[in-house]
Image (cartoon, grey):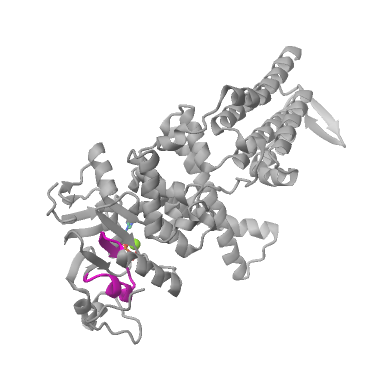
Amino acid sequence: MAAGHAHVLYREVDSPVHRLPPEVKIAAMVAFTIAVVATPREALWAFGAYALLVVAVAVLARVNARWLLLRSTIELPFVVFAVALPFLGVGERVDVAGLSLSVDGLYGAWNIVAKGTLGVWASLLLAASTTTRDLIVGLDRLRCPQILTQIATFMLRYLDVLVGEARRMRVARISRGDDPRFVWQLRGFAAGVGALFLRAFERGERVYLAMLSRGYTGRMPAVWQGAGAATTGQWLVAATVPVLAGAVAATAVVLT
Amino acid sequence: MQPTAPSLEVRGVRYAYPDGHVALHGVDLTVARGERVALLGPNGAGKTTLVLHLNGILTPTEGGIVVGGLAVSSDRARLAEIRRRVGIVFQDPDDQLFLPTVAEDVAFGPANLGLRGAELAARVDEALAAVGMSEHRDRTPHHLSFGQRRRVAVATVLAMRPEILVLDEPSSNLDPAARRELAGILRDLPVTLLMVTHDLPYAFELCDRSVILDGGRIVADGPTPELLGDEELLARHRLELPYLFRPTPGPTPVRE
Ligand SMILES: Nc1ncnc2c1ncn2[C@@H]1O[C@H](COP(=O)(O)OP(=O)(O)OP(=O)(O)O)[C@@H](O)[C@H]1O
Ligand SMILES: [Mg+2]
């Protein structure tokens, strides 16, 4: 169980990305995602350019491809949905390997998979390089409404709890002779999901109560707010990623 | 605040959970300053529910609570002061510790109270010294052993200089050595203590007075050796002394 700042996605290494103040990284991640989402789906080359940007940041943050790809399985349900689209879509059709596919559906699928993957990657890179405490502080510094800060913090905490509990429940299931092969695992997992969410919710609740009991009022105390707020230089450094992405998006819009 | 006011006064507290389940049926309890009281009772007796009332996290359906002469109310400033006075150490230290280092976590409470700089640092040092964790101040809480984490959890609350220290099952999940170390620490703390526990020898060792809560009512209140000597009373409320343990009133157990 991860107690403390190291939520499940955090990678404890030192890198230039880790050292950037959190508010700068959060802003860059959001701006990058907006640029990606605004890109017309027909501009295939633009998505290649975004992927290169993600790779560059990942290298800088010392996050390896394996880690990134494994964690991206979060979006698996959306991929499954996307795969179905070309078969279900209507309108103009193309033949691929003897299958008649809807062109619109193909683009729709691509749209979901490409944009979803890039968005997930950007969020994963932010999470990998920022502790829970820094995420809270960063959102506070961006004058994010308290309620959003709290929701974000709780989502991270629930994620921790969910992963920890899921692991324990899996061990308990296997110990009782459940066959841990993929499909069966899913069945056992589905049965446990309700209990899992309930437990995660209860723990999140207890953590929050413990914070309240120590005088938490919804904002991190100013001790952590003040120190190390981003300098103009750091804003400029971090801005390179969304600025490049913005340029790509603008070009793509103009060209299509 | 008069210096003679009791640390804690619970007056006729009744509480029904939102689902209608009545967990407390009129509880009265007074704890004088400097007193050490064990709160005993079977599972589901309402002990945790009562603890959550003490700092205004739950609001009684009927009755009221006074801490050091100050009535608990939902007023914001009042609540902040009550939460400073009542230090609750929750059962699971993982619910309580969430910052990157031990020292930062201990600073969280006093920082919420508005302490800064040297004053804040002094509070942190003092609290860590009290639980013998000074040399671990820069470590990550989740790298510590369970017993050490529980000691840090106690420090996070001590740093707020509470009027009354409330511990929910402090000896649970500790190995015998950690259990003994924590007892040594708690015995030497110069604070009023309310300790929720199922561990009767622990109550005997640390608290002169015990209270039994069962079915949401206080059913016994008296000197610990007397209560623990009454086998019939204990059996009626699903409490049991460990095999071969006999509470003998007399010299307190060996000090460390
Ligand atoms: N959120 C809730 N909603 C409804 N009922 C609850 C809730 N929390 C606790 N209860 C009920 O209130 C009663 C008292 O619970 P409480 O947690 O205070 O017991 P406890 O004395 O702390 O027990 P334990 O020794 O197991 O910790 C129990 O019957 C419990 O089922
Ligand atoms: Mg309890």
Quadrant where the C terminus of chain A is found in the figure:
top right
Looking at the picture, does residue A164 appear above or below residue A88?
below
Q: Quadrant of residue B227?
A: bottom left
Instruction: Look at the image and say whether residue B179 sits in the magenta stretch.
Output: no
Query: Quick check: which quadrant has ligand 2?
Result: bottom left
Depth order, front residue of A156/B34: B34
Q: Residue at x 42, y 52 (%)?
A: B96
Q: Residue at x 74, y 35 (%)?
A: A87
Residue A224 shown left or right of residue B30 in the figure: right
Residue B5 shown left or right of residue A151 in the figure: left
Residue A172 shown left or right of residue B17 in the figure: right
Task: Please report the bounds of the magenta region as a residue range.
Answer: B189-209
Looking at the picture, does residue B29 appear above or below residue A63?
below
Whether residue A208 is visible, yes or no, is no
> Where in the figure is residue B21, as x and y percent of width and height?
27, 56
Residue A170 shown left or right of residue B224 in the figure: right
